[in-house]
Amino acid sequence: MSRLGFVGFLLAVMPAVAQAQPTATDIVEKSQQAFYYPGSDMKAKVTMELIAGEGKKRTRVLAMLRKNDSTSRNQKYFLYFHQPGDVRRTAFLVWKYPEKDDDRWIFIPALNAVRRVAASDSRSSFVGSDFTYEDISGRDLSADAHTLLHEEKLGEADCYVIESIPKSGAEYTKKRAWIDQATFLPRQEEYYDAQNELARRFTADAIENVAAGEGKTIPTVVKRTMRNVKSGHRTEVRFESVAYDVGLDDEVFAERALQSPPRKWIE
């Protein structure tokens, strides 16, 4: 190739190379897709261990069902608690909408009643754990301003480091996320409080490729931890029997399912 030809080749490919670099918002959107949206639906057994600083442990076991709307980014979640006895039969339903408040209901067995959960409670603790309701079902992409700080390795993973600043009141004032460049799963997240001090840290402790039919596998975070750095309390979560594209229908996510749960899917 002549020198002029080589220069021409470079000029031709440079725009494509420039376009290949994703923006911070692109990265966060892909990360949300990888973490909260894989498959058309999903079922899993979830074990949560709430561990105090001195080591005292409480365990919660629940079934998690999730379905994506095929024409939008709307989602529905159904969570049913099996253990311990004081929360057994408690069920939680979320209809999640991007860019507006979610609809949330909880069934409280002791009252034999369904209650709506206020949207403002999205930043409250999820059943006494170190996760918030928002951590479980995700946060609106446009709720924060995202900046790509740099790229670095975290363990063996090449990661984008993204800083996200809430545009209005939130449970944190700044979040930094280490997002795996290969899978776009979050490897680590740090949440800072109003004093600009590290308050909580999320870590993806184990990632497995889960079969999803037709020879596909989906990288899935099957063990994760949220640690309250200040109190020393942490919540460890294990996902087991994870299955995608199982054919959940809309009846599973109807409000009446809170009192009459879909046994086929939660046992």
Image (cartoon, helix red, strand yellow):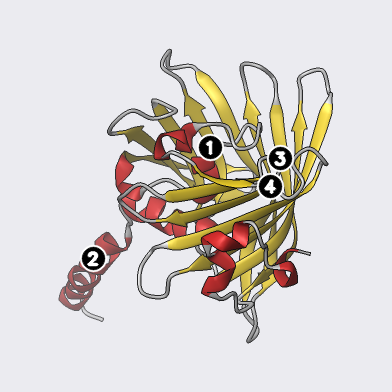
The residue at 25%/71% (across/down) is 13
How far separated are the C-alphas under marks 4 and 3? 9 Å
Q: Would you name the residue on which mark 2 appears?
A: 14
Give the farthest residue toward the front: 112
Labels 3, 2: front one: 3
Please say whether residue 182 is visible from this viewpoint: no
Q: Which of the two discs, 1 and 4, labels the residue nearer the N terminus?
A: 4
**Horizontal and vertical percent for residue 257?**
60, 62
**Horizontal and vertical percent for residue 187?**
58, 46
Please say whether residue 37 is visible from this viewpoint: yes
Q: Amino acid at mark 3?
A: Ala
Q: Would you name the residue on which mark 4 appears?
A: 90
Labels 2, 1: front one: 1
How far separated are the C-alphas under marks 3 and 1? 36 Å
Q: For the C terminus, give its image quadrant.
A: bottom right
Q: Amino acid at mark 4?
A: Thr
The local crowd at label 3, few if under 14, some if 14 to 19, many if 20 or more residues have their Cα within 10 Å, is few
Q: Amino acid at mark 1?
A: Glu
Q: Would you name the residue on which mark 3 appears?
A: 110
Q: Would you name the residue on which mark 1 appears?
A: 189
Please indicate whether residue 65 sits to the left or right of residue 138 in the image: right
Secondary structure under tag 3 reads loop
Of 258 and 131, the residue lying toward us:
258
Q: For the N terminus, give its image quadrant.
A: bottom left
Of 241 and 112, the residue lying toward us:
112
Q: Which of the two discs, 3 and 1, labels the residue nearer the N terminus?
A: 3
The residue at 67%/62% (across/down) is 261
